[in-house]
Image (spheres, rainbow, N blue to C red):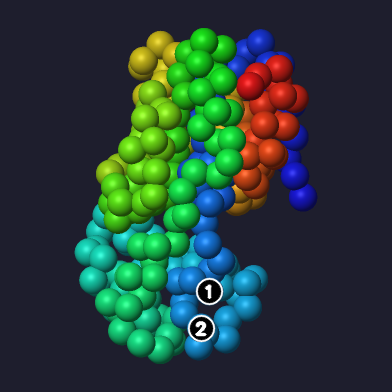
Amino acid sequence: MRTTPTTNHATIQAVVFDMGGVLVELGPFTDILGPASTLESDEFWAKWLASSVVRDFEMGRCTPSEFGDRLVADFGLEGTGEDLVSRFAAWPKGLLPGAGELVESLSGQVAAIGVLSNTNALHWESQPDATEVQALFDRQYLSFELGLAKPDASIFEHVINDLTSAGAVEEPSQILFLDDNQINVDGASAVGMTAAVAKGVDEARTCLANLGLG
C-alpha cells in the first residue's frame, strides 16, 4: 500500500529522505544472513525491525564486532559474527540510478534537503558512493550519531526542532518525509510531518511530482 501526501505543495519547505531503499540500493536480506539461513523475507524483516541488537547498533550503542556476535546468536545463524559483519558491510550497493539527480533537482525549490536514516558508521562512511551520498544533503539526521531511531517520535521531533530552529520551516507539515517502510511514515505523520512511502527513485519522484516538486 502506498501513501499519497496530501499537503498543498506550496507549503512544503523541506524534503527529508530515508537513505537505504529510497536513494541507495540495498542487496537482498540473504546477503546479510548468508546462504544457509532459512528465514523468509517477511519473517526476516519482522525480526530485523524488532531486534534490540539492530537497534543498539543503529543507535551507536555497540561496536560492529558486538553487533555481529549478537545478531548471529539472536537470529540463530551459522558462521561467526565477523563473517556477518563482512556481509553486512557490503549490503549497500551505491546510489540508485537517478537518485543524485532527483535530490539535486530540489535545490532552489525548498529551503532544506535532508537525510533521516537508521544507519551506522560502517555504512555511512564506507558504503559505495559514500562521498556522493553525503554531499547531497544540507541536513543529516543519522541514528548512530543522534542516539535516536525511527520510528520513535523523538527522532522526528529532533528533525522538526532542527529545521524550525534553522528557519527552514515554521511547522511540521512543511516537512515532506519519504521512507520505504510504512511504520516510519506512520511515525512521521504522527508528529505532524507530511510523509509518504517511496520505494526507490521512481516512487520518490512520483511523490514529489504530486506536490509540484522535483
- Quarter location, residue 160: top left
Q: Is residue 60 left or right of residue 196?
A: left
* Helix, strand or loop status at disc 2: loop
Residue found at x 41% / y 21%: 163
Work out whether residue 60 or residue 157 is closer to the camera in this orientation and state it.
60
Residue 107, image x, y percentages = 50, 16
Contact check, label 2 and label 1, Cβ < 8 Å: yes
Q: Disc 2 or 1, which lies upstream in sequence?
A: 1
Q: In this view of the protein, can residue 147 be seen by the observer?
A: no
Work out whether residue 194 or residue 141 is closer to the camera in this orientation and state it.
141
Determine which of the numbered discs, if any, sits on residue 35 in the image. 2
Whole-Å distance between the Cαs marked 2 and 1? 7 Å
Which residue is identified by label 1? Answer: 30
Amino acid type of disc 2? Pro
Quarter holding the C terminus is top right
Residue 104, image x, y percentages = 51, 23
Residue found at x 44% / y 44%: 117
Q: Tell me if mark 1 has few (under 14), some (14-19) or many (20+) residues whose alpha carbon lies within 10 angstroms of its own.
A: some
Would you place residue 155 above or below residue 63 in this image?
above
Amino acid type of disc 1? Thr
Would you place residue 58 above or below residue 109 in this image?
below
Residue 66, image x, y percentages = 24, 72
